[in-house]
Image (cartoon, rainbow, N blue to C red):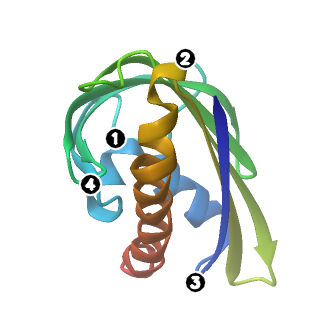
Amino acid sequence: MKRIFKHEVILDCPIARAFRYTTTMGHWPEWHPATQSVAGQTKKPGKAGDRVREKLRTAMFFSGTIDWKVVSSKPPRDWSLQTVTISLPLLNRARVRIDYHFSPEGKKKTRLTRLFRYDLPASLILLDAVYLRFKMESESQEALRRLQGSIRQP
């Protein structure tokens, strides 16, 4: 079962800075509510093939790790990553892909569009319908709200 969430936010910085900050995976704990820590290539914007391990607690219940791989990086416009492995209770057979698209809004602002796609095994349809999808969507919205605040800081 596949789901897609699409969210947009206006960031108060030029496109190059928005891309650099958002795609530097070491910044994730600063703005994503589920991310507790990251390890791997976390010091600069992720390039295709880069990997990172995220330690997280998602949907207020599931704790574990996700191994991510950057599958596309086209600065300063597009960046995508997908799961390699998920080590979370019940969710180890899920698959996730996140796509970011950056577009300028004048000279000093950037529109960020984030597509969050996930695919769950059929055994989790009910859990998704009554709980997971709402929690994951609210985390996505909160992440972008926090990103707006974090990216303003030098």
Q: Nearer the viewer, mark 4 or mark 1?
A: 4
- Mark 2 crowdedness (10 Å alpha carbons): few <14, some 14-19, many ≥20: few
Tell me which numbered mark, 3 or 2, is placed earlier along the sequence.
Answer: 3
Residue that carries the numbered disc 4 in the rendered image: 29
Kindly indicate whether the residue at mark 2 contacts the one at mark 3 (C-beta within 8 angstroms).
no
Q: Amino acid at mark 3?
A: Asp
Tell me which numbered mark, 1 or 2, is placed earlier along the sequence.
Answer: 1
Q: 13 or 32: nearer the eye?
A: 32
Q: Amino acid at mark 4?
A: Pro
Examine the rendered structure and indicate whether residue 79 appears above or below residue 16.
above
Residue that carries the numbered disc 3 in the rendered image: 12
Disc 3 versus disc 2: distance between alpha carbons? 29 Å
Q: Tell me where residue 131 appears, x and y as whole percent.
A: 40, 52
Kindly indicate whether the residue at mark 1 contacts the one at mark 4 (C-beta within 8 angstroms).
no
Kindly indicate whether the residue at mark 1 contacts the one at mark 3 (C-beta within 8 angstroms).
no
Disc 3 versus disc 1: distance between alpha carbons? 22 Å
Q: Nearer the viewer, mark 3 or mark 1?
A: 3
Residue displayed at 41% across by 61% down: 139
* Horizontal arrangement in the rendering, residue 88 relative to residue 3 (left or right): left
Residue displayed at 41% across by 40% down: 127
Q: Amino acid at mark 2?
A: Gly
Numbered disc 1: secondary structure: loop
- Mark 1 crowdedness (10 Å alpha carbons): few <14, some 14-19, many ≥20: few
Q: Quadrant of the C terminus?
A: bottom left
Q: 16 or 140: nearer the eye?
A: 140
Residue displayed at 48% across by 78% down: 148
Residue that carries the numbered disc 2 in the rendered image: 49
Numbered disc 3: secondary structure: loop
Residue that carries the numbered disc 1 in the rendered image: 43
